[in-house]
Image: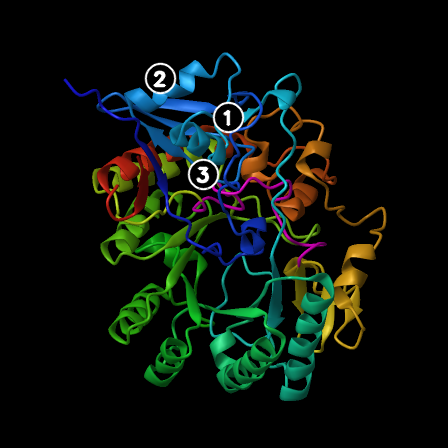
Amino acid sequence: MKHPEPRILFARSQGWATTHCACAVDGLMPEPAPAAAPRGLWRQASELFRAPLPQAHEVFFNPRGAAGPAVLNAPARDLFRAFRQPQPLASPHAQQLARLHLLQPLDQASSPAPAPAVRPQVLTAWLHVTNACNLRCTYCFVHKNADAMDETIGRAAVDAVFRSARAEGFRAVKLKYAGGEATLNFDLIRTLHRHARRLSERHGIALQEVILSNGVALTPAMLDFIRDNDLTLSISLDGLGEGHDAQRVFANGVGSGPWVRRGIERALDRGVAPHLSITVTSHNVQELPQVVAFALERQLYFNINFYQEHQPWQRHETLRAQNEALIAGLRAALQVIEADLPPYNVFTSMLDRANLAAGHTRACGAGDSYLVIDHCGQIARCQMEMHHPVTDIHAQQPLADIRLYEPGDREPHFVDVDDKTECAACPWRYACGGGCTMMTYRVHGRTDVKSPYCDVYKAIFPEILRLEGLRLLKWEGSAAHAWM
C-alpha cells in the first residue's frame, strides 16, 4: 500500500500588498526565503503558531517570517516533527519547510530568531490633491476648504518622489491620490499619472497608483480612465445601514450610503473592482458582518481600519469602539467569511496595520518609506501631521530629510516594536508591528507602549490564521500553491 506523500499548502504571493492605508505592508513584498541549501543542521523554528484543521491537517505560522501561514497534511507534519532533533535538509519537502520559515538553522536555535529582515521596497507618497470634499465624515482629520494642488506643485511633487526613490534604491513608487475627495481634482490626477508613467519608464522604477475616494461622485469617464490606465480605486464603505450613514454624511447631514453603493456598482459595471476600506467606530461595529458579506458577494478585497484619534485636543471617545465590542464585531464578520470561504486571500492583511504574510518591525512606513505631500508642496511624515511639515518638494532628497528628522518632546517618535516595553515578548509583535504609532501617542502621550488595540489583535489573529488554513484546504487548486 502506497503511503501518502507530504503535502504543504500556502498562499501564492499577491505581489505588492493590496492595502491602501499608510501601513508597513504598503511597501513590503512578501516572498518566501531563498531556497535553503541542504547544508548544516536545522530544527523547528521557535514561537510557531499551530492550529488543527479537518482531515488531520494543521495550519502553521511563523510570526517572525515573511511567508504567511502554511497547511501541512499528516505526513508533512510528521516530517516537521522529526526536526525536533537537528538534522540536515535531506529532502525537497524539508527544504520547503525551511523556505516557509517553519525550520531554522541550528545556530539560531539557542537564541531567539532575529527580527524580520524584510525591508520596504516601495516608496509610498500620499499626494493631497485637494482639501475639498462633498462629505463631512465624523472621523476625518482634514479641514475642508476649496484649496487644491495645482499642476506645477503636482509635477514637482512627483519629481521629488522619484528623486528620493532613485537615491534610496526603491524598486517601485506608489502614489496615493487623496484629499478631501480626490476625484474633485481628477484633471490633475490624469496629468500626474501621465507624468509619473514617463518617470517610471525613464528610470526603470515600477509604478503603482491608488485613488482614495468616497465613491459618491465617480463618473463613467473617471472609471474608464482608472480601468484603462491600470489604477487602483479604493472606496470607503463603512456599512450598509445606519452605521455608515451616522459617520459618512454629506455637508447637509444626509447619509451617503446609497450613493457610495451606487458608485461601487457603477465601478464594477465599468470593469473596475474597487478595494473597500472599512473604518470601524462605535457607530458601525455591528454592521461589520453585512459590509463584509457585501464585499465577498462581489469578490472584492477589503481591509478593516480601526478608528484613529488624530488631534490631541480633539478626543472622540464616543467614536472609538470598545475593544470588547470590536472583537465581537470582527468575530461576527469572520463567521460570515467562514460560511463561504472565498477563492482569494482576504485574511493576511485585512486587519488594521497588520500583515500576516510579511513580518515587520513597524506598523507604519512613516518616517522611513512614506512621504505625505500637501497641496502646497509641504512634506510631512504622516497625513495626520500635515499641519507639521518637515521638508518640501524642492529639497534635493526629501526622504532623507524625513529619516533624519529628530522629533521634539511633544511629537511622536516612530519606534520599532522591539523597543516597546510591553511588546518585546509578544509572539504577535511582528504581525501588528505595534499598531498605529499616532493612535498610541494620542491615547497614551508616548509611543513606547502597546497599542490601545493590542487586545483586539491578540484575540483575532489566531482566528484569522485558522480561517486562512480552511481557505487553503478548500481552494488549494486555484488560490493556493500545493508543494508536493
Amino acid at circle 2 = Asp
- Is there any visible trace of residue 230 in the rendered image? yes
Circle 1 SS class: strand
- For marks 3 and 1 on the same chain, the one whose residue lies earlier in the sequence: 3
Which residue carries the number 2 mark? Answer: 78
Query: What is the crowding at mark 1: few (fewer than 14 residues within 10 Å), some, or many (at least 20)?
Result: many
Alpha carbon distance from label 3 to label 1:
14 Å
Alpha carbon distance from label 2 to label 3:
20 Å
Q: Which mark is residue 68?
A: 3
Q: Nearer the viewer, residue 477 or 448?
A: 477
Left of 153 or right of it: where is 253? left
Residue 368 counted in the magenta span = yes
Left of 462 or right of it: where is 5? left
Query: What is the crowding at mark 3: few (fewer than 14 residues within 10 Å), some, or many (at least 20)?
Result: many
Residue 322 counted in the magenta span = no
- Is there any visible trace of residue 52 in the rendered image? no
Amino acid at circle 3 = Gly
Q: Position of residue 267 (x, y in %)?
A: 31, 72
Residues under numbered marks 2 and 3 in contact, where contact means CB atoms less than 8 Å apart: no
Amino acid at circle 1 = Leu
Which residue carries the number 1 mark? Answer: 103
